[in-house]
Amino acid sequence: MKKNLVLITFFSLIILFTQNLSARDNNQAGWKAEVASVIITPEESMWMAGFAARTRPSEGKLHELWAKALVFEDAAGKKAVLITTDLSGIPKSISDNIRNRLEKSFKLSRSQIIFNTSHTHSGPVLQDALHALYPLNEQQKEAIRIYTIKFENQIEALVKKALNSMMPVIIRY
């Protein structure tokens, strides 16, 4: 989680410090970028992935879980999307679903999309992930299924928000 925070903070600072440059400089650079975030904390009690000592679903929250997107576009219009999440991991089936949706909605190829997770052991179990580790009843399986659908919708909306809000920037190091 600390790694995600450092990465997002770094790129956010680049964007913030370069957005106020003159229009002439921005036009010369040709780069655009934006960041967006959304809370992905489950609204109900769920099993937390990777918490092996746990014998029951969650019992509240200490802080929110987040998904964040960073979108870059170069002068030629080529885009790249970095999506970070406060989850233990994202199963291939879910990342494939999201990538397919982003390709259909925004014409983003798989090579333009990067997923990163903080590998928190306090994030919800997702569909097709770690089910064998928990004594899930049918109600809990259904909650996971519903949460996973909502999560996929949130990620698509998150990327849309970032894509629709891109601003000229100059990338410096």
Image (cartoon, rainbow, N blue to C red):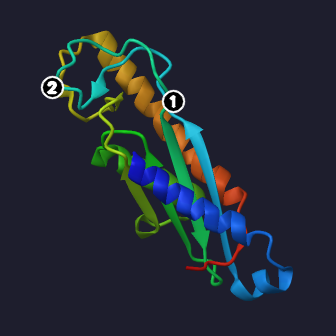
Q: Residues within 10 Å of mark 1 (few under 14, many from 20)?
A: few
Q: Give the CA separation, mark 2 to mark 1.
A: 24 Å
Dot 2 amino acid type = Leu
Name the quadrant containing residue 20. bottom right
54 lies above or below 102: above
Query: What secondary structure is found at the residue carrying circle 2?
Result: helix
48 lies above or below 84: above
Q: Residues within 10 Å of mark 2 (few under 14, many from 20)?
A: few
**On the rendered structure, is 108 left or right of 2?**
right
Dot 1 amino acid type = Glu
Name the quadrant containing residue 21. bottom right
138 lies above or below 29: above
Residue drawn where x is 51% and y is 30% of the image: 64
Residue 7 x %, y %: 48, 59
Q: Which residue is mark 1?
A: 64
15 lies above or below 75: above
The front one of 13 and 149 is 13
**On the rendered structure, is 154 left or right of 162?**
left
Which of the image's four quarters has the N terminus?
A: top left
Which mark identifies residue 133? 2
Q: Are marks 2 and 1 in contact (CB under 8 Å)?
A: no
Residue 96 x %, y %: 36, 51
Residue drawn where x is 59% and y is 45% of the image: 37
Name the quadrant containing residue 172. bottom right
